[in-house]
Amino acid sequence: MNTDIVYRLNGGVYLNITNKCPCRCAFCIRSQGDAVGDAERLWFDKEPEMEDIKKAIDAFDFTDVEEVVFCGYGEPTNAYDHLIETAKYMREKHSDIKIRLNTNGLSDLINKKPTAKELCAVLDSISVSLNDTTSEKYDKITRNIYPGIAFDAMLAFTKECVKYCDDVRMTVVDVISQEDIEKSAEICESCGAKFRVRSFAKGQ
């Protein structure tokens, strides 16, 4: 069975370019099944090459699509070079479509270098998963491979993105307490980003 690289979910269009991720979030939608939206399968038997991604974009009907989002069954910045090249390819082919990155904000740790400036140069907006209010709680809910340093790295990445991008958001999923949602909003404000609560039930 072929794996979907471009798919639709709840009216949005998404780019699934990798299955790799440094987190195993307790609420992760990919633990619920093989696909979401109109995709038949989002798991790769083999990570896609740029040629595969370009072919999928060329084959997709982007008529009336206003925004495309890097967000699939993995962390897009785990395929950093492909992400940058794909964003540039979208600009060439569909210059009127906005491009957003949904990310866990751990790109600098994953890629062992500062990445916010380069990412912001090819994206219109960035949405960072804040997930929880302290490093300890964050590590527990995300089960990431960088315990003790991931939370601060994610906040630092977000602050850097705010310097270079006009539309930076931080999100939490409504599986945490209302008190922690309110604390999360304060953290988001301190980073200079917009805040959004995502619905676990809707998978977005």
Image (tube, grey):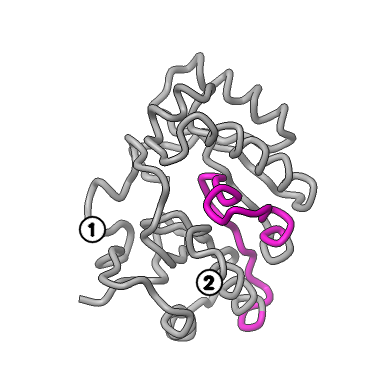
Q: Quadrant of residue 43?
A: bottom left
Q: Position of residue 47 (x, y in %)?
A: 36, 71
99 inside magenta stretch: yes
Would residue 42 be counted in the magenta stretch?
no
- Residue 174, above or below 40: above
Looking at the rendered structure, the kind of residue marked 2 is: His
Q: Closest to the observer: 52 or 144?
A: 144
With 102 as the anchor, is 59 left or right in this view? left
Residue to which mark 2 is pinned = 82
* On screen, residue 21 above or below 186: below
Residues in magenta? Answer: 92-120
Q: Is residue 15 above or below residue 157?
A: below
Q: Which residue is mark 1?
A: 34
Left or right: residue 74 compared with residue 31 = right
Q: Residue at x 47, y 38 (%)?
A: 146
Q: Report the amino acid beneath label 1.
A: Asp
> Which one is closest to the eye, mark 1 or mark 2?
2
Question: Distance of mark 1 from mark 2, alpha carbons?
Answer: 23 Å
The N terminus lies in quadrant: bottom left
